[in-house]
Structures are given as C-alpha cells and as structure tokens.
C-alpha cells in the first residue's frame, strides 16, 4: 500500500530532481516500505482486536475488516478483576518511576558534580550492576520476599524494579546533569542559596526533561514485567498485574487470539503514548548518554 | 581545595569534566549523602541477592528444604559438578551463545543500515520510519511475543497464507522456533541501535565531511576513514548493550516457545535457570546456572570497560 502512495508522491516531484538523485527515490521507497513492514505487527494487533471472532479464526485472514466489534475488548474488561490488574500495574509503574527518578537524580548529581575518592569505583559499580541478569535473581529474591512476608504484595514488584532500573537511569542521567553549566552553581552559591535549594530549585527543574526521558526505561521495564508478577504473586490474584491478565487468554493449545490481541492493545497503548510524548527528549538523551 | 580555585579558571580538562574544580559547597560527605539512597537500594536488592544466589548454589536446596523444613546441606561445588556433567547444560549454553550472537549481528546490521538510510531520505519517509521503529520499541516484550506468534500462527496467521506455507507450524522445529524468536527480538531491539547511530551520524560536523570530499575522498572512503572511526564509541556502546540484552532474552523465549520449546529444545540459560528453580524445584541448580550467567556477563562488562578505557573516555 505504501508503495502506491509513494509512487503517487514521486510524480509530484520535479523530474529534474529525480534525474539528479536517482538513488533517493529508491531510498525513500525502501524507507516507506520498511516502515510499513515494521509497523505491520502493531497494525495487525489492533486490527485483530477489533475483528469479529469469525474473521480472526479464519484460514483466509484479511488485512481489513468491515465489521469492527468491541467483543474482544468486552471479554478483556469483563474479566474478573481486570480493572484491579490495570490499577496494580499503574501503581507499581508510577511508584517505580518516581522513586527511581528521585534516587537516580541524587546519585547522578553526586557522581557528576563532585569529585571524591572512589568516584570511579562507584561509577563502575553502576555499570556492572546494569549487566546483572535479573531473571537469575528471582530465586534469592523469592526467598527474601518470603522471609519478609513480601510475597503477594505489590512491594515485591516495586522494590526489585526500583533496584533494577536504577543503574541505567543513573548512567543516562549523567549526561543531563553534566550539561548544566558550572557557572550556574557558582552564581547560586554567591547569591547565598543553600545546597539543598540549588539542588531542588535550580538543578532539578533543569534536569527534568532528562529525568522524563530516563523514566521511559524504568516505566517500560516495570510495565512489561511478567516474571516477577508470575513468581512473587503466587496465590493472591488481586495483587496481580496486566501481563498476567493477558496470559489468561493465551493457552498454548487453544489461544483466544481475539482476547490476546485486545489485551495486548490495552497494554501497549499507554507505553506508546508515553513514548511518543517523550521521543524527542529520548533521542537527545540517548545521544548524550552515548557521547559522554 | 581553596588553593586550587586560583588555578582553575574556565579551562575544561578532558571532555566535559573539569578536573580540579572545587564545588561552591565543598565537603566530602555530601556526595555520599546523595549516593546513599541508591547504594542502599542496590546493596539490599542487587548485591545481597547476588551473594545469596552464590550461597544457594553451594547448598542442596530443593522443595524438601524450602517447605519441608529439612536441614540444608552444604555441597560445595557439587551442584556445579552436576551441572557441568549434564549434557543438556552444554547444549543450552551453546544455543544461548549462538542465538545471542545471531540476534546481536542481525540487530546491529538492520539498525545501522536503517540509520544510514535515514540520513539519505527527506522528512516524510524519515518520520514514517522513525515512528514505526518507536512503535516497535515501545511494544512490551510480552505483547510483541504474542503478536508475532499470531502473525506466524499455523492456522490463522497471515504470514503462512502470504508465503503459501499451508499449516506449517513454526514453533515445532528447533531452528524455525529460534528463527521466529530471533525475528521478534530483532524487531523490538533494532530501533535502539537505529536511533542511537542516527543521532551519532547527525552529530558529525558537516565541515569534516566536506573537507573529506574536497580532498577527493570517495563516498566509500569517507565512510571507512571518517565516519566509522568517529562513530566507534557509539558503535561500541550499542554492540555491548545488544550483547547484554540478547544474552538475557527471557520473555520472548518463555512466551513464544511455551517455556523452552518441545522437550526443552529452545531453552536458553535464563529460561533454563528459571525452569530448574521454579518448575523442577531444583533451586540450587537454578542458582548455579544464574552464577554461570553472571560470570559470563561480567566478562563482557570487563571487555566493555577496557574498550572505554582504551578510547580514553573519562567515566
């Protein structure tokens, strides 16, 4: 489809331009085609969520539907405690995002705006912490949570996720904190601002865009997690999160594809919205994290 | 510290970090105060569990000890001996390495190629590709897995229809199942590489490229001798990050192959450790596998640090 659109568009361009840059037309068609291929799974997900059951379970799948229906969504939302799952997911994600942003902000300030003994050691520790395979830590964490009585509570999801999103958040925030000019700090000191005042009323607002970009990663990893939810919420279903609600529809032998696709859509939309809102900052943030 | 203030001036030593600048509010306790929350959280929820992981891997720890109250017995390296003597472990290790390597190579190839493509097209195609990639990036691993499974479903999937494969089941064969997971992993991880490398290419000053072409360098020569060396730090970062992520793939394998495939043919270390611990209640074996993974990733990290050092990057 995008090829057709592209062909129509290229006719508008001056022919001279086409002759001068013959490669560009090919490149642009390729870009559009690849964009369509990359976006196709998401399109198919949303489409299938709206298809009536007969069209989903059809051996002649069509890339459109003339009878969109909310049946699949009704099944998802009508699921027992679905609202509870959604709320739990939101609570966990928001708690992790806020806590890890604040903690990472303080830590990033410490390692970029101060020189102290063992500074490099601390930085390397944060780097190493990024590499830890968190799935392997499910085993000891399970026992710790059990001993502390944390199983089946949202804390068992919030606390580990704060720990696992911190190292990358600190690593990424460094660039943003470093970018705030030293002169500003000196000026604030001369004007008699206390350290805390500089930290929260000057530095914090300036770094906020970077914090938001960093939060995307904490948000995604928390929102997506199903391993901890599966391992730590073992009996009290009311404390479960969205991925578990999705897996209810997904039985390996006889999956309810309509329900799976509708639940997937519900789960993906918040992340997409978050992503699109912060994408510009995200790109510059990655550039910063990589270059520094 | 105050004596250094005189010599400081506005000179910035190295990149971005002024070597001897005093802080208006000096004091060596302050940074530790700021670091305290992070260190407490990481110590309690990362370092301590790692210590425990190592400990569990040295004991005999199964369901009987967990809920039956049987005393735990110290086994030394018995669990490791059992693990290394098990043929399946070596098979899974090999599969993990090969699979991760394939994922990294494909992700990097696709990501870099598309980053270059982005620099060659005008705004509209670029925006389209960017948005599509961001969509793939933002998709949760679990929904990505189910959607790709559905696309390749034997009965109702559009892919088999288009390719005319009838009811070929992708998840039955070992290699076709791995291939399917690979496609999903590449789909959701190439955007990071693409966006980062694209940002890197854009940050190369145009004067450098103009100078090169004024000197008569060919397109290819500009790439090989100017752009790639300038992009090397970024390429190192995306490569290492990809290695780390792809080595730890869990959700995709777990969901797409139903917990490791038929008879465990699609297990990777991460899923293997989880299955040993939580499905077979062999907690100490699972922990031993976790330790092996940890050591491999630590080795990768050390290589990364050496590369950073060699580039003269200041941390």
Image: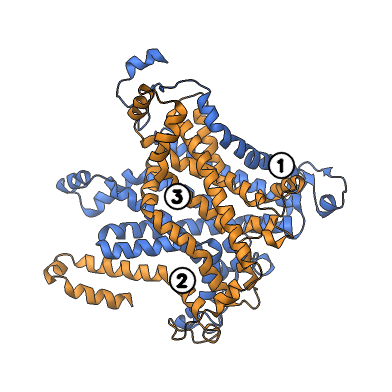
The hue in which chain B appears in the rendered picture of the protein: blue
| Residue at 40% in and 40% down | A205
Which residue, given by chain and number where applicable, does mark 2 sit on? A41
**Quarter residue A115 falls in:** top left
Chain in orange on the image: A
Chain hosting mark 2: A
Within 10 Å of disc 3 (Cα), the crowding (few <14, some 14-19, many 20+) is some
Q: In this view, does A173 lie above or below A195?
A: below
Q: Can residue A74 be seen in this view?
A: yes
Secondary structure of residue under mark 3: helix
Chain hosting mark 3: B
Within 10 Å of disc 1 (Cα), the crowding (few <14, some 14-19, many 20+) is some
Which residue, given by chain and number where applicable, does mark 1 sit on? B52
| Residue at 21% in and 73% down | A10
Within 10 Å of disc 2 (Cα), the crowding (few <14, some 14-19, many 20+) is many
Chain hosting mark 1: B
Label 3 or label 2, whichever lies nearer to me, is 2
Quadrant location of the C terminus of chain A in the rendered image: top left
Which residue, given by chain and number where applicable, does mark 3 sit on? B239
């Amino acid at each position: 489809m995008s090829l057709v659109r592209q062909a129509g568009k290229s006719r508008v361009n001056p022919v001279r331009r086409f002759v001068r840059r013959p490669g560009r037309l090919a490149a642009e068609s390729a870009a559009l085609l690849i964009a369509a291929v990359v976006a196709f799974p998401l399109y198919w997900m949303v489409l299938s969520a709206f298809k009536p059951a007969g069209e989903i379970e059809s051996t002649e799948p069509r890339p459109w539907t003339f009878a969109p229906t909310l049946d699949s969504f009704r099944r998802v939302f009508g699921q027992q405690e679905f609202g509870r799952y959604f709320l739990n997911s939101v609570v966990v994600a928001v708690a992790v995002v806020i806590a890890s942003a604040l903690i990472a902000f303080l830590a990033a300030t410490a390692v970029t705006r101060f020189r102290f003994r063992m500074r490099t050691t601390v930085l390397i520790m944060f780097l190493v912490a990024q590499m830890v395979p968190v799935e392997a830590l499910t085993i000891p964490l399970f026992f710790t949570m059990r001993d502390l009585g944390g199983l089946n509570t949202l804390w068992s999801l919030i606390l580990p996720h704060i720990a696992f999103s911190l190292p990358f958040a600190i690593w990424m925030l460094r660039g943003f904190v470093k970018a705030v000019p030293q002169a500003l700090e000196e000026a604030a000191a001369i004007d008699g601002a206390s350290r805390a005042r500089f930290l929260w009323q000057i530095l914090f607002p300036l770094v906020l865009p970077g914090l938001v970009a960093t939060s995307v990663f904490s948000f995604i990893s928390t929102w997506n997690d199903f391993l901890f939810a599966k391992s730590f919420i073992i009996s009290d279903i009311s404390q479960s999160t969205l991925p578990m609600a999705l897996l209810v529809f997904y039985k390996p032998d006889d999956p309810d594809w309509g329900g799976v696709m509708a639940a997937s859509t519900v789960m993906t939309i918040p992340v997409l919205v978050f992503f699109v809102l912060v994408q510009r900052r995200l790109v510059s943030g990655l550039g910063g994290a990589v270059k520094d | 510290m105050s004596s250094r203030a005189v010599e400081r001036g506005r000179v910035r030593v190295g990149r971005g970090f002024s070597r001897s600048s005093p802080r208006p509010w000096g004091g060596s306790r302050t940074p530790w105060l700021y670091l305290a929350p992070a260190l407490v959280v990481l110590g309690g929820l990362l370092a301590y569990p790692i210590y425990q992981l190592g400990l569990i891997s040295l004991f005999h720890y199964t369901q009987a000890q967990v809920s039956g109250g049987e005393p735990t017995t110290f086994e030394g390296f018995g669990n490791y001996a059992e693990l290394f003597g098990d043929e399946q472990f070596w098979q899974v290790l090999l599969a993990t390495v090969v699979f991760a390597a394939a994922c990294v190579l494909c992700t990097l190839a696709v990501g870099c190629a598309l980053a270059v493509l982005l620099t060659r097209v005008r705004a509209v195609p670029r925006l389209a590709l960017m948005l599509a990639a961001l969509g793939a990036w933002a998709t949760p691993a679990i929904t990505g897995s189910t959607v790709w499974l559905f696309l390749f479903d034997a009965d109702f999937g559009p892919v088999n229809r288009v390719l005319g494969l009838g009811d070929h089941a992708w998840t039955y064969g070992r290699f076709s199942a791995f291939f399917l997971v690979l496609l999903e992993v590449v789909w959701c991880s190439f955007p990071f590489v693409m966006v980062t490398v694209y940002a890197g290419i854009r940050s190369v000053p145009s004067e450098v490229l103009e100078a090169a072409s004024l000197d008569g360098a060919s397109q290819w020569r500009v790439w090989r001798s100017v752009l790639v060396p300038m992009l090397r730090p970024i390429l190192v970062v995306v490569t290492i990050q990809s290695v780390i992520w792809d080595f730890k793939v869990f959700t995709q394998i777990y969901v797409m192959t139903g917990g490791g495939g038929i008879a465990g043919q699609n297990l990777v270390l991460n899923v293997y450790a989880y299955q040993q611990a939580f499905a077979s209640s062999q907690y100490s074996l699972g922990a031993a596998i976790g330790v092996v993974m940890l050591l491999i990733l630590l080795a990768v990290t050390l290589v990364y640090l050496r590369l950073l050092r060699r580039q003269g990057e200041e941390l």
